[in-house]
Amino acid sequence: MKPIISESVYKTLTNLIRRKKTIEVKPLHDELSNALIVKDNFLDSKIVTINSIVEFVSSSFKKPMRFQIVLPEHADLKQKKISILSPISIALLGFKETDNFFWKMPSGLKKLQILKVINH
């Protein structure tokens, strides 16, 4: 499965990668290089993107987790906002509600299932 990313989010994230130039952006760069880039108005509203609220289940945690994926400067764990540079955000980016897939995380291969995606 290829992640699907809108043109504007692709531009935002490639600019973020250029600005950061650290090892933490490499997984995001790799994900973007494999993505299908679509015009903004063609992005399905159930696809995970920047500012999406995502509810998912991981093989690591049996209980569903829910958070919002944001740019690094807006990350705030107390508000359940996590950076797009976090491994789980990169894993979910570009996939849609109901998708099931395996993803290599720092702690090993994990099965992920996206239960709900809310985009405003």
Image: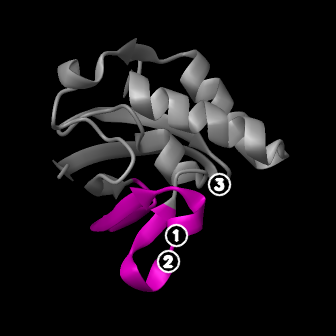
Q: Identify the element where label 1 is drawn.
A: loop
- Mark 2 Cα shell of 10 Å, populated few (<14), some (14-19), many (≥20): few
- Pointer 2: what residue? 76
- Foreground: 73 or 62? 73
Cβ atoms at labels 3 and 2 below 8 Å apart:
no
Q: Identify the element where label 2 is drawn.
A: loop
Cβ atoms at labels 2 and 1 below 8 Å apart:
yes
Residue at 17%, 38% (x, y): give it.
46
Toward the bottom, the furthest residue is 78
Indicate the quadrant where residue 43 lies. top left
- Pointer 1: what residue? 75
79 vs 87: above or below:
below
Question: Which amino acid, by three-letter code, is at mark 2?
Answer: Asp
- Mark 3 Cα shell of 10 Å, populated few (<14), some (14-19), many (≥20): few
- Indicate left or right for 72 with 18 as reference: left
Residue mark closest to the camera, 3 vs 2: 2
| Highlighted magenta segment, given as a residue range | 59-82
- Indicate left or right for 96 with 3 as reference: left
Question: Which amino acid, by three-letter code, is at mark 3?
Answer: Ser
